[in-house]
Amino acid sequence: MKGIKPVPRSLSGWTMFIFGILALVMGILGITSPDTLLSLINFQIIDPSTRAAGDYTLVFITASSMASLNMGAYYVLASLVDFKAFYMWTVPFRVLTFTVFTLAISRGIAPSGFFGVALWELIGALLTGAALLWERRSNSGAG
């Protein structure tokens, strides 16, 4: 495909690429081995035979893992075409994700182990935002 390079062309592209690969891997892991994914974020593992009727935890894990896989693909593809507008769009929404996830923990909706996911989003947003700012400043001084 025209415009796609085998590796990212910018620091901000690399932040998106790495985040995208991690999201892809976590998505695949959640689809193929939900218990492994849950254990990584310190969630209690419940034997499927003891789940109550109407417990859709595994359905939710499958859906969120598929979303993670898709998001990872979008991030990787955006990084390979250096789609900086997309990078900028992700920064505030990743900060929002951090905020919502952290509030869920503080309200007792999610266990404290979920903070790792929230922190992953915040660190990724800050790194991408900082890289974009650095690139903008570097490019404005070049002319």
Image (tube, rainbow, N blue to C red):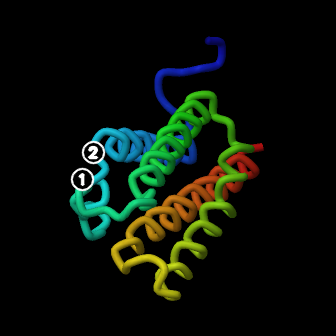
Q: Position of residue 109 (x, y in %)?
A: 48, 80
Kind of residue sitting beneath label 2:
Ser
Q: Disc 2 vs disc 1: Cβ atoms closer than 8 Å?
A: yes
SS at mark 2?
Answer: loop
User: 103 above or below 120?
Assistant: below
Residue closer to the observer: 19 or 11: 19
Residue at the disc numbered 1? 36
Q: Quadrant of the N terminus?
A: top right
What residue lies at 24% left-to-right and 53% top-to-bottom?
36
Residue at the disc numbered 2? 33
What residue lies at 59% left-to-right and 20% top-to-bottom?
4
Q: Position of residue 39 (x, y in %)?
A: 24, 62
Q: Tell me, for residue 20, which label it has, or none.
A: none
Q: Hey, which quadrant is residue 119 in on the image?
A: bottom left
Kind of residue sitting beneath label 1:
Thr
Residue closer to the observer: 136 or 40: 40
